[in-house]
């Protein structure tokens, strides 16, 4: 399915890639930390960002939209109390 966006045709994999990149940027996470939070391999996450898709895009979107993903107690549980590698947040 092609989706028109600002004069471009964008397929579902490209749309998912944009969503994943935007989510990771908003959360201030490295690719490795984002993959851990979502419970997927880093290479799978990097593939999604490069537009190679994901077999369960609806579940991925639910996980990214979930408020629980960005809460510190969840990060601590997933990472055994270690701080996630976060990128510096850009001021808006």
Image (cartoon, grey):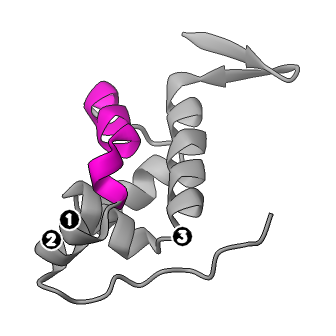
The answer to whether residue 12 is magenta is: no
Residue 88 visible in this rendered orientation of the protein:
yes
The residue beneath circle 3 is: 28
Q: Quadrant of residue 60?
A: top left
In the displayed structure, 39 sits above or below 89; it is above
The residue beneath circle 2 is: 78
Disc 3 is placed on an element classified as: loop
Q: Nearer the viewer, mark 1 or mark 2?
A: 1
Q: Nearer the viewer, residue 87 or 77?
A: 77
| Overall secondary structure of the magenta section | helix
Q: Quadrant of residue 81?
A: bottom left
Q: CA distance from mark 1 to mark 2?
A: 6 Å
Q: Which residues are magenta?
A: 56-70
Please tell me which residue is depicted at 47% across the width and 74% down the height of the picture.
Answer: 30
Q: Nearer the viewer, residue 14 or 22?
A: 22
86 on left or right of 60: right
Disc 2 is placed on an element classified as: helix
Q: CA distance from mark 2 to mark 3?
A: 17 Å
Q: Quadrant of residue 9?
A: top right
Image quadrant holding the C terminus, namely bottom right
The residue beneath circle 1 is: 74
Please tell me which residue is depicted at 23% across the width and 89% down the height of the picture.
Answer: 82
Q: Mark 2 and mark 1 in contact (Cβ < 8 Å)?
A: yes
The mark nearer the N terminus, 1 or 3, is 3
């Amino acid at each position: 399915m092609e989706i028109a966006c600002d004069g471009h045709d964008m397929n579902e994999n490209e749309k998912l890639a944009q969503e994943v990149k935007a989510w990771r940027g908003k959360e201030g996470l490295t690719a490795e930390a984002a993959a851990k939070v979502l419970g997927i391999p880093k290479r799978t996450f990097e593939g999604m960002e490069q537009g190679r898709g994901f077999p369960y895009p609806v579940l991925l979107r639910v996980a990214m939209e979930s408020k629980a993903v960005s809460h510190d107690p969840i990060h601590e549980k997933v990472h055994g109390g270690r701080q996630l590698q976060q990128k510096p947040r850009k001021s808006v």
